[in-house]
Image (cartoon, rainbow, N blue to C red):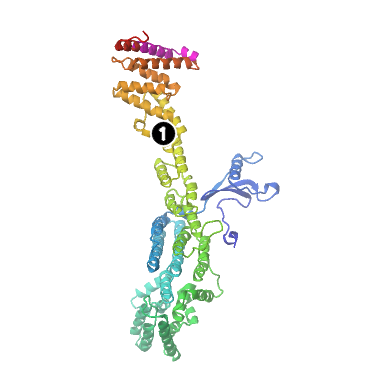
Amino acid sequence: APLTDTVPPQVVPGADSSSRQLCFAWGPAEVLVCETLFGRAGGSRSRCLAGAGAAARALTDSIAGTEDGAPSSSRVFVIRRDQDIYIQTLRKLFNESHGIFMGLQRSEEELAGKSRKAQLVQVSKNYRSVIRACMEDMHQAAVSTRDPALQGQYSTQVSILSAMELIWNLCEILFVEAATAGPLLLRLLDWVRLHVCDVDSMVREVLSSESPSKHKLFWNVVDVFVLQGRMDEARHLLSKEASANPTSMNMYKILDDLMKKMPVPSLSNTQTLTELELKWQHWHEECQRYLQDGTFASSPHMESICKILLGDEDAILEKKELMTTWYHFLVTRLLYSHPTVKPMELRFYAQSSMDLFLGGESSPEPLDMILMAAFEFEMHQVIKECSIVLSNWWFVAHLTDLLDHCKLLQSHNLYFGSNMREFLLLEYASGLFSHHSLWQLGVDYFDHCPEYGRVYLELHIERIPLSTEQKALKVLRICEQRQMHEQVRSICKIMAMKALRNNRLGSALSWSIRAKDAAFATLISDRFLKDYCERGCFSDLDLIDNLGPSMLLSDRLTFLGKYREFHRLYGEKRFPEAARLLLTLMTAHIAPCSFWMTLLTDALPLLEQKEVIFSAEQTYELMRCLEDLTAGNPDKQKFQDDDIETTKVEMLRLALARNLARVIVKEGTVEGS
């Protein structure tokens, strides 16, 4: 059926959809909705806008006002697809099930036969234990809160989690464990006893009374035990009735003997189905004989129990209120009429049991249809119905993954290229990425989607808000581990730009180096040099001193690193090495022309040292650089008019000439003589 036939329309609280049309823009996990200026009907104004561009235009128009200039209110609604992700009490469900999921992916696929099945059944039970623990936490939260709205919300979640465990447990019995005839009935009895808890309070009330056999609900409790196949507990209660009423002792002994001798399937292979059926037939005939003889005629309650033992549908249906659900009726009916039921026969008994129990008085609920699909072994229908009814993707994603590991969904591929398991895991993981911290779990789910997982991860990880440097590093590590080079560069560029805006040059340079962005590294290096010219010292010395091979990313970064090295050598009084490095920076044209005057000025203290540092050849090179600077400056006139710059040039010329003279004297020769 089309999706529109099965999914009810969603109402946006507060949105005036009756008088105004709404526009929307899809996001990866949310929808942006806003009211437009267009009415619901009337000429060309009755139209619907769709898409991000339309939403932006409508929002702009709404803020600006109406066509006649009157102001207009603007309301924007953010609709989240997976609201359960934000419920704090469900965090345990998402976090702990993630560990189980990862364990299942890493499990030994080589295990075969019973070992593999036992492993998968244990995984299923682990999932159910997480659901139950979460349900108990939610129940405690509902009890402890005083807010009626919160209490209602928690109670709703308890009901949803209870239904989830009910469905999962049945799927575990039928699909994962694949219980065979005999053990199948025992598993279904355990299933009913675990999940039909409406009568538990009544049982506790009767058992805690001073005289249980005198309690008004005594026979109701006995009936509950019989309907659930809890024979030992039923016999124990009946013994109290026999003690309190000696006249019924003979009937009690006969009924007790019948209940004691009732053949039940065994989980072990001690008897064959044929032997069980033969024993059950003899026992059934004995029950029939006592009923026909009128043995229990004087006790309507015991007679009713005997009829139930015989599988009388009318007698069982009389206890409808005690069973509360049609699937309880189904299991009771099978227990007393067909204990060796085969899995493929369940569909017929399930359908007739639901029809008999509901009796046309009420129509099946969505939960009933899901359970019916399971009894009919329609796994895909179970998954489809759960996807529609349940409020999040957690259940269907994990159940489908488990069934896929059981090799039960191998033949089912979806028309758009993926299989059902991957499609549902992608949906679930996409929802996790809309949460500020649960997105980290979503990464692992994407990793185990071989077809489209990486593409989804790349798209979603780019949308994570990098609110702190710690979070950015976490995202970056995830990308680096998966060789997502484009995303690594993108994250580093974003963080570098943020750091630059906040004037944190060291951090900005570090991020740009990590991104291997030469252009941005050049820009930040220029900022470092500009700051040095203004303040006379470098910031973030640790970073610059330890650039290593990273300085080769760009010429400007290389110059920054080498220029800082010059200052370090000068500070350590290693003047000859400092002089050679300074000259290299100028003659190799690594330094920007605008910085030449600063470099020449840095040479002044070396030229004025008592010991001659620069050789004659080096001094000539410095002179040439100075002349190139003064002659090649486009603002030559302005340069000459600047008294400070003129003074620097004259001082440099004087120092260079004096140094050259000292060198010539020292070397004992005159150049060109």
Q: Is residue 392 visible?
A: no
Residue pushed farthest top?
673
Task: Give the residue drawn at x 48%, y 44%.
Answer: 462
Q: Quadrant of the C terminus?
A: top left
Q: Nearer the viewer, residue 302 or 232?
A: 232
Sort mark 1 into few (<14), some (14-19) or many (20+) by Cα contacts within 10 Å.
Answer: many
* Residue 642 counted in the magenta span: yes
Q: Which picture quadrant has residue 139?
A: bottom left
Task: Give the residue drawn at x 54%, y 56%.
Answer: 417
Residue pushed farthest right?
43
Residue pushed farthest bottom?
293
328 versus 31 height, above or below: below
Mark 1, residue position = 509
Task: Give the residue drawn at x 37%, y 9%.
Answer: 672
Q: Main secondary structure of the magenta part?
A: helix
* Residue 524 counted in the magenta span: no
Q: Nearer the viewer, residue 141 or 491?
A: 491
Q: Return the x and y of residue 55 as percentages of the image width and height.
A: 59, 45
Q: Return the x and y of residue 415 as percentages of the image width and height.
A: 56, 58
Residue pushed farthest front?
673
559 versus 382 height, above or below: above
657 versus 202 height, above or below: above
Q: Nearer the viewer, residue 304 or 134?
A: 134
243 versus 83 height, above or below: below
Q: Which picture quadrant has residue 124?
A: bottom left
Residue 550 shown left or right of residue 573 in the figure: right
Q: Return the x and y of residue 427 as percentages of the image width and height.
A: 50, 55
Residues in magenta, as a range: 636-658
Q: Quadrant of the N terminus?
A: bottom right
The kind of residue tagged 1 is Leu
Q: Nearer the viewer, residue 592 or 173?
A: 592
Q: Return the x and y of residue 53 as percentages of the image width and height.
A: 59, 43
